[in-house]
Amino acid sequence: MSNEQYFCDYCGYNSDSRERCTHCGKYIADLHDNPPQFIPPLWGKLILRLHDGTEAKQIWTELAEIWRAKVEVTRPHKPSQLEQFHTSASTVELYGADYMASIMREALGARGSVEFQELPHEQMPHRPKSQLPRPPTVPRNKR
């Protein structure tokens, strides 16, 4: 048995076997023969719609917790959007990456739908850059 380790994309652990993960048991040989290509995420507008708005508050609270864990913690430089979830409406509009659409779609399940619209970088909201305070001016005769 060799000391070589193989990374398992399914569970995130290293495996001693190239064929099958020694941690989760999944078949991983095809992952090393055909590694997935890196695709940069697309950024745009996420529109979350509920099919039935009777439990809107509860559903939005659940999704807000998922959004906080996935986006607010990992991307603090982006403007916070948690206040968008404090509504009883059946639609919420957010700005984020395409991978967040799949996470939200999975969390919503059959209770609603998620639509993703790609936007140019200029239309994405950004936190304004902080500017340093201007240094105090010194009168000419004191220089």
Image: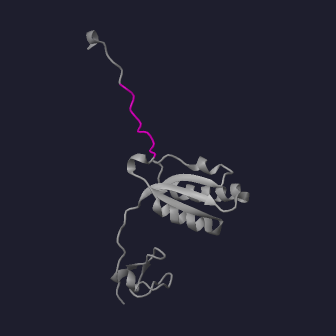
Identify the image quadrant of residue 118: bottom left
Quarter of the N terminus within the rendering: bottom left
For the stretch drawn in magenta, the main secondary structure is loop
Residue 20 in percent (x, y) is at 44, 87
| Residue 73 at least partly seen | no
Residue at (59% x, 64% y) in the render: 113
Residue at figure coordinates x 45%, y 86% from the top left: 27
Q: Is residue 75 visible?
A: yes
Foreground: 73 or 101? Answer: 101
The structure residue drawn at horizontal position 38% and vertical position 32%, both measured from the top left corner, is 132
Residue furthest toward the right? Answer: 54
Q: Is 55 drawn above or below residue 139 in the view shown? A: below
Please provide the residue range marked out in magenta: 125-134
User: What residue lies at 58% left-to-right and 49% top-to-bottom?
Assistant: 82
> Is 93 rendered above or below residue 132?
below
Left of 80 or right of it: where is 32?
A: left
What quarter of the picture does the C terminus occupy? Answer: top left
Q: Nearer the viewer, residue 7 or 101?
A: 101
Q: How is the image coloured?
A: one colour
- Name of the residue lying farthest toward the top: 141
Number of numbered discs overlaid on the protein picture:
0
Q: Specify whether residue 126 is painted magenta.
A: yes
Q: Position of residue 127 (x, y in %)?
A: 45, 42
Residue 20 is inside the magenta segment: no
Give the x, y percent position of residue 42: 41, 59
Q: How far from the left and from the top, in percent, is residue 13?
A: 45, 75
Depth order, front residue of 138/129: 129
